[in-house]
Image (cartoon, rainbow, N blue to C red):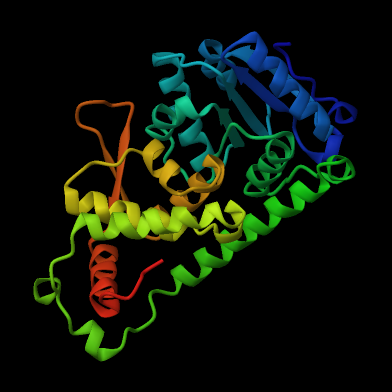
Amino acid sequence: MDAISTDPDDLSNFGQAPILIAASSEAARARAVRTIGATGVRIAGEVAVAEARERLERQVSVSAVWLELDEDCGGPLDELLTHLNRDVANGRYAAVVSASSALVDPVMARLEDSTVEFIVDADDAERAASLAIATSHCGSPVRLSDVAADRNAERLRQLSDEVSRIAATLARLSTGPSAAPPAVEALQVADLPPLSADTVRAVLRARRLRTRYFPEDLFADPAWDMLLDLLQAEISQLPVPVSSLCIAAAVPATTALRWLKTLVQQGVFIRRPDQRDGRRVFVELAPEASNALRRYFAEVGKVAVI
């Protein structure tokens, strides 16, 4: 459908404009339609990735764009992601990008605005929740009462708790780091004992061993795992792409990406473009975060750091 009706009766679903779907294949399109249909919001149209930019330029009104990807569309995808990133940053509409894990790097290379929701290999509950989160940023969130009433209610609650935890962390970080004890703060990196990558890797291995004895999600701490992974990579002088960091976080990729965006936003992590591949970005520790981790290891000494 090319023309969007302005009849108030057609736009009454939850008091918001409809949602435009862009997809990389017929299968991807069908999956996006099922997700949007479950929320009860009207669909403005369904287009291929290559057609989405032109459609957005003449679209009367949309509350969100849902981009469903099950394959790499190359240049047209890069252009669309850049377009979405700009429009979301300008508050024109919300956006959700749903993709497979194989597409994490090319998508993240183009997404810079923290309010673009990016989900990876997500289940039905997480897909519905991501739409509500995305649209909440533009003041007209999708309501999930009907979705939450089904068997996914517990999963939606967990997702809400996860997002709340990240928001709380973001609020704490925004106030600045707590003052360190004078003796520790006085230590400069040059005065610290050498820290080897093997030492940090041993800590990471010890953390993974806990899953042999307890459920994996019992000890989930993606921010700390990502900090440690970036520290050992820094010592080894190895670049860390986004996809690799998501694996190191030891949580679902979507959760890892939410933490990554939070930590980049607060200056704990830094994104660096890959000079050899424009469709990939690397992540590294900010100097202050690196110094803090090295002082931490120096203070705990040989005590097991897990």
129, 5: nearer the viewer: 129
Q: Is residue 101 visible?
A: yes
Q: Residue at the location (39% across, 15% down)?
A: 75
125 vs 156: above or below = above
Image coordinates of residue 50 in percent, x first then y, are 51, 11
- Judge from the rendering whether residue 49 lies leftward or rightward of residue 14; answer left or right: left
Q: Residue at the location (62% across, 49% down)?
A: 137
Q: Is residue 227 visible?
A: no
- Judge from the rendering whether residue 44 lies leftward or rightward of residue 173; answer left or right: right
33, 158: nearer the viewer: 158
Q: Residue at the location (39% across, 31% down)?
A: 105
188, 92: nearer the viewer: 188
Image coordinates of residue 94 in percent, x first then y, are 61, 38
173 vs 151: above or below = below
Image coordinates of residue 208 in percent, x first then y, are 45, 53
Q: Quadrant of residue 60?
A: top right
Image coordinates of residue 165 in percent, x first then y, are 60, 62
* On-image quarter of the N terminus: top right
